[in-house]
């Protein structure tokens, strides 16, 4: 198990629960609150009653969304005699009928793989590293790192993160991977032919190892705006205890995980008011975090499509992309794979959630087990 929290941090779990009536379980049986919002595209845009005008956070869905995106941690009720499963266990098992465990479905997955080549896409926070209070201490274990390294030996592997590309590279530290930071708005991959480069969004670049790489940055023109917004966000949240702002270059994150719930309306109102001045920016929700990002048609799903094209396997029947992620922003990638009938998503969650993924895994330790099983399968083939 690699769930040992980083020193000074505790491993947390704050998923958005599913509407349990969908599970065919009588609501009276279940204690978990229902989410008031649906996040059809994997993200919630700022609610606007009149076009172009943002309403007060108290009179719109902001606070509901903050709560729905991060309900209080549920107490896992264990029957004292251990004879009966808790309500939460019943709900989770019912949910797993629709989203079976990728571990117990491993043979089925192997059948789907057959002779096809896997391309592996991995989210970082909540997938490779457990959720902890301090985003700067979200380290992956060395066992997880060596597992990902082994995966990359056999399959092209990409990390697709909401964090900045530099930061996620620093945390993962493996040169053999592709990296897409800022929710896919900053993609680094080996040099491609000059003629297929659109000069606005592509840049050639020599990395720290002296290797020539290409960067694809579809939101490059937003860098000064994000920088300005980042600085303002730092200023306007300075007096809110526990608030933390991160600059991911093409997007900014405002964390409220460590902010007292009584101050949530204040932080939401300030972010909301600031965004009135930036109509070209939008807001999405992650796990106890607001993400301020450019209004461009780009997300983790587009990044997956882009990387598959770049690898020259965009529509290949011989390729099976697998995406593992835990967050709403990963839903865009799950949807791309589901809609394209190419590959599948695996949702990492300890509670039932609506998803476009096909399979599920409970937590980072199950992610590691699944990845290790894939590696073993390849090792076995090589014998
Ligand atoms: O796309 P991801 O790699 O999953 O990144 C999404 C966000 O992850 C980080 O925040 C989340 O993880 C933190 C560490 O466990 C946790 O403290 C925080 O509450 C979570 O929201 C990262 O700090 C964000 O910038 C990313 O957008």
Image (cartoon, rainbow, N blue to C red):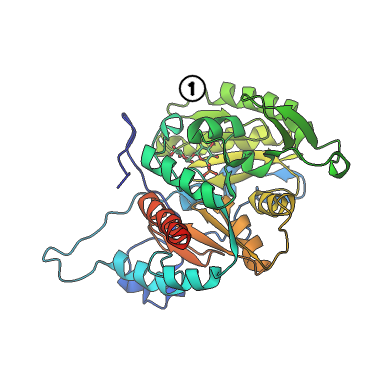
Instruction: Give the left or right position of residue 283, taking residue 196 as reference.
Output: left
- The x, y position of residue 12, in whole percent, is 36, 44
Instruction: Give the left or right position of residue 370, taking residue 307 as reference.
Output: left
Question: What residue is drawn where x is 69% and y is 54%?
Answer: 308
Instruction: Give the left or right position of residue 7, taking residue 266 as reference.
Output: left
Q: Residue furthest front?
A: 383
Residue 189 or 248: which is nearer the viewer? 189
Question: What residue is drawn where x is 63% and y is 43%?
Answer: 183
From this view, report whether residue 244 is shown above or below residue 14: above
Estimate how packed mark 1 is, as few (under 14), some (14 to 19) or many (20 or more) residues with alpha carbons within 10 Å: few
The quarter of the picture where the C terminus appears is bottom left
Residue 336 or 114: which is nearer the viewer? 114
- The x, y position of residue 42, in whole percent, is 59, 56
- The x, y position of residue 88, in whole percent, is 31, 64
Q: Quadrant of residue 342?
A: bottom right
**SS category of the residue bearing label 1:** loop
Question: What residue is drawn where x is 37% and y is 55%?
Answer: 369
Instruction: Give the left or right position of residue 65, taking residue 337 as reference.
Output: left
Please name the residue that numbered disc 1 is placed on.
239
Q: Is residue 3 visible?
A: yes
Q: Quadrant of residue 164?
A: top right
From this view, report whether residue 77 is shown above or below residue 181: below
């Amino acid at each position: 198990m690699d769930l040992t929290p980083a020193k000074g941090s505790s491993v947390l779990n704050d998923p958005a629960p599913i509407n349990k009536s969908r599970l065919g379980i009588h609501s009276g049986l279940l204690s978990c609150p229902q989410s008031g919002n649906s996040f059809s595209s994997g993200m919630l845009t700022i609610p606007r009653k009149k076009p172009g005008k943002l309403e007060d956070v108290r009179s719109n869905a902001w606070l509901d969304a903050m709560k729905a995106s991060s309900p209080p941690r549920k107490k896992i009720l264990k029957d004292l005699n251990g004879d009966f499963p808790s309500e939460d266990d019943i709900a989770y098992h019912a949910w797993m009928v629709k989203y079976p465990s990728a571990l117990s479905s491993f043979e089925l997955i192997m059948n789907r793989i057959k002779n096809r080549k896997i391309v592996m896409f991995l989210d970082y926070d909540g997938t490779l590293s457990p959720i902890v209070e301090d985003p700067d201490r979200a380290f992956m274990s060395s066992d997880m790192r060596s597992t990902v390294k082994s995966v990359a030996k056999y399959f092209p592997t990409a990390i697709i993160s909401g964090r900045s590309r530099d930061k996620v590279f620093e945390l993962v530290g493996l040169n053999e991977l592709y990296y897409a930071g800022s929710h896919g708005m900053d993609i680094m991959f080996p040099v491609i032919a000059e003629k297929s480069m659109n000069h606005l969004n592509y840049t050639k670049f020599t990395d720290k190892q002296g290797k020539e790489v290409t960067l694809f940055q579809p939101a490059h023109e937003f860098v000064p705006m994000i920088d300005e917004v980042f600085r303002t966000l730092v200023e306007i949240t300075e007096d809110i205890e526990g608030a933390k702002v991160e600059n991911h270059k093409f997007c900014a994150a405002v964390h409220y995980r460590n902010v007292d719930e009584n101050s949530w309306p204040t932080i939401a109102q300030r972010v909301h008011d600031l965004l009135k001045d930036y109509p070209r920016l939008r807001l999405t929700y992650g796990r106890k975090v607001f993400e301020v990002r450019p209004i461009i048609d780009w997300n983790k799903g587009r990044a997956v499509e882009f990387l598959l094209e770049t690898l020259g396997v965009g529509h290949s029947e011989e390729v099976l992309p697998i995406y593992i992620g835990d967050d709403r922003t990963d839903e865009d990638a799950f949807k791309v794979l589901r809609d394209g009938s190419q590959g599948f998503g695996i949702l990492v969650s300890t509670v039932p959630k609506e998803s476009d993924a096909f399979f599920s895994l409970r937590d980072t330790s199950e992610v590691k087990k699944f990845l290790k099983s894939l590696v073993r399968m390849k090792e076995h083939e090589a014998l």
